[in-house]
Structure formats: C-alpha cells, structure tokens
C-alpha cells in the first residue's frame, strides 16, 4: 500500500505541479483503483494454495491410530508422553515449545527463536503413535502473545532474552506456542518406519535449541527443567524438588517405536493443528472461496474506478 500511495502521489504531483495534499491522495480514485486491482489479483492467486490444502486433507484417509497404514495419513488424538519440559515464557509443562522474541526498541531490530521438544505421542483409545514434529507446519494457539517491558518483565523472561542474545533492557514482542499434556491434536503426516530418532545430549545446546538434533533425552529434559527453575529463583537459592518432572511410567512408552508420524521423505504434507479435521477443512473452504472469487471482484472494482476516473477526465 505504501508503494501504491507513492505512485498516486507522484501522479498527482505531475498533474498539479505542486506537492500533493495527503488527504487528497487518500481520497484519490487512482489510489483506490490501483489498490483494488493489485490486492484483488494477489488474493486470487493466494486462494489456490488453500483450495489445494483442503482437497489434500479431504483425499487423505482418516484413520484410527491402530488402523493407520504406512504412507500419508490423518489421525487425531490426545497428547501423552513420558516426561516434559518447561516452556521459557509461559512457564508451563509441555512436550514442545516454540518461543519467539522480537526486540522493538530503538536499537537494531532482532528476532530470536527457540524450539525444544521431548518425545510425545498421540493416543486415541486404540493405540499410540510417536510424533516427530521437525519440519511440521504448526497451527497452535499461542500460550504467550504479549509485549515485554523492562520495568514489568519477570526474571524468567529476562533469562530467556539474555540466553538468546537479546537485551533485557529494551522492549520486545514475545510469542510462544506449546504442545502440552492432554492437548487434542489433528495431524496430517506420513507414517514411516522409524529412521532411528536420536536424542540430543544437551538441552541448552545451540543446535538443540533450533530443533535440529532430535528430542531431548530424559536427562537433558531434567537439565532444562532445573535450569528453568533456577532462572526463577534468587541467586544462590537451592533448587526445590519441584524442579523434577512428575514421575511417569517411562517404561510404558517405547522411545524407539517401529513407526513414527513425521515428514515424508519426498516432501509430503506435514500439518499439526489444535483444531479438528472438520474445522480445518471448513476454514480452508471459506478462505479459498473468498480469495478465488472475491479477488477478481475486487480487481474488477478497482479497474472500474480507474477507467471511470480516466474517462471522466
């Protein structure tokens, strides 16, 4: 829109020979005509990926976990797992978190992200399947979406910012997305033979923080938990027993299962959502119709404004 406004302003300057009035530019049919054509065409082409995704979900077999076959599959279930992490912003127990911090101070803008996860499974009453979330397109409700202020931020948040190389003395926008015990998830993925998932040895290592090395082992998850608890306590405090995760029957979870839900080798779809399959399809259907049909209507309206204005002069 800024570039469109500049074009319209330049055209007005050429016609009048003087600097344009900003209010006149905003009321200009040329501006709204160009905007309508540009946005309409953009919406039209953006609608087709939504339509493609909708058809893909509809054409992929939905299965119970016990009846899932190798290949592309859709499953839904409750998230369970042997042990948890502590998310760095909401301070909640989770199996997966993606935290994002964007500095908004006067200094150079920086964006830092951190992704960590422990092994987790989907359970639907017929069985359990391990999920390897690497490479997934996530649609999760934000556990944190707020502005950080140095005067009101807590020690836990400041510790996260400093650890990621950001100053805790400047404002920042914080977002965090988590997968917690008991969450209901819809997963469109490839059920593959287990390629040999490996855990990372250090929960705070740089590669692990980017989610490149695999899930955190129980020992690494305990280290991450203790480090998180320590960051909330005054210096020199003794870490309480609550630093350890609640005891879980670890032996009930096979951390090296024969098959895993993950991204396909040929780049197939991998989508994890907090919404049901039906809700996802309905939203994609609405968005594809609005974009594919509404885009041309908006473009034609913008073109009509331009033609009408030019013919009127």
Image (cartoon, rainbow, N blue to C red):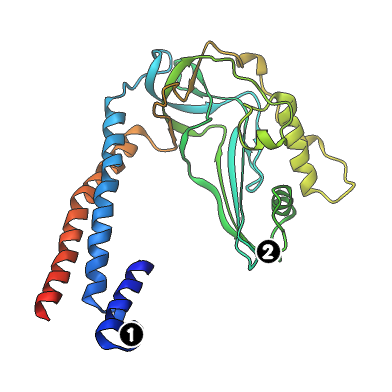
Categorize mark 1 by other alpha carbons within 10 Å: few (<14), some (14-19), many (20+): some
- Residue under pointer 2: 170
* Residue underneath mark 1: 20
**Which structural element holds mark 2?**
loop
Which residue occupies the foreground of this view, 109 or 215? 109
Task: Note whether 309 is above or below 257 in the view shown.
Answer: below
Tell me the quarter of the picture where residue 1 sits: bottom left
Say what secondary structure mark 1 lies in. loop
The image quadrant that residue 74 belongs to is top left
Res. 226 mark: none
Q: Quadrant of residue 22?
A: bottom left
Instruction: State the image coordinates of residue 198 (x, y, percent, origin top left).
Output: 64, 20
Residue 263 vs 93, above or below: the answer is: above
Residue at 57% across, 32% down = 181
Q: Furthest-top residue in view?
A: 258
Could you say which is closer to the camera, residue 136 or residue 96? Answer: 136
x%, y% of residue 269? 39, 29
Residue 52 at x, y = what percent?
28, 35
Nearer mark to the viewer, of 1 and 2: 1
| Label 2 CA crowd tier, 10 Å (few <14, some 14–19, many 20+) | some
- Indicate whether 294 appears above or below 253: below
Quadrant including the C terminus: bottom left
* Residue situated in front as seen by the camera: 303 or 174: 303
Residue lying furthest left? 311
């Amino acid at each position: 829109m800024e570039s469109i406004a500049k074009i319209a302003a330049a055209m007005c300057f050429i016609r009048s020979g003087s600097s344009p009035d900003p209010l006149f530019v905003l009321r200009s049919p040329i501006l709204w005509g160009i905007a309508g054509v540009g946005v309409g065409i953009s919406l039209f082409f953006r609608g087709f990926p939504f339509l493609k995704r909708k058809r893909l979900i509809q054409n992929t077999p939905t299965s119970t976990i016990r009846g899932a076959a190798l290949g592309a599959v859709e499953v839904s279930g409750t998230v369970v797992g042997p042990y948890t992490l502590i998310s760095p912003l909401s301070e909640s127990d989770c199996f997966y978190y993606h935290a994002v911090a964007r500095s908004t101070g006067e200094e150079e803008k920086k964006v830092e992200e951190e992704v960590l996860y422990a092994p987790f499974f989907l359970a639907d009453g017929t069985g359990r399947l391990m999920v390897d979330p690497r490479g997934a397109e996530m649609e999760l409700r934000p556990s944190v979406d707020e502005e950080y202020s140095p005067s009101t931020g807590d020690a836990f948040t400041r510790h996260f910012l400093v650890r990621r190389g950001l100053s805790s003395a400047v404002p920042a926008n914080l977002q965090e997305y988590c997968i917690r015990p008991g969450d209901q998830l819809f997963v469109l993925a490839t059920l593959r033979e287990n390629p040999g998932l490996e855990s990372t040895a250090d929960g705070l290592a740089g590669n692990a923080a980017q989610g490149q090395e695999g899930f955190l082992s129980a020992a690494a998850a305990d280290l991450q938990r203790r480090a998180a608890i320590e960051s909330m306590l005054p210096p020199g405090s003794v870490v309480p027993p609550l630093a350890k995760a609640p005891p879980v029957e670890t032996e009930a979870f096979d951390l090296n299962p024969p098959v895993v839900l993950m991204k396909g080798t040929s780049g197939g779809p991998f989508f994890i959502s907090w919404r049901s399959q039906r809700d996802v399809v309905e939203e994609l259907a609405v968005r594809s119709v609005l974009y594919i049909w509404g885009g041309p209507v908006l473009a034609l309206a913008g073109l009509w404004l331009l033609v009408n204005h030019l013919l009127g002069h």
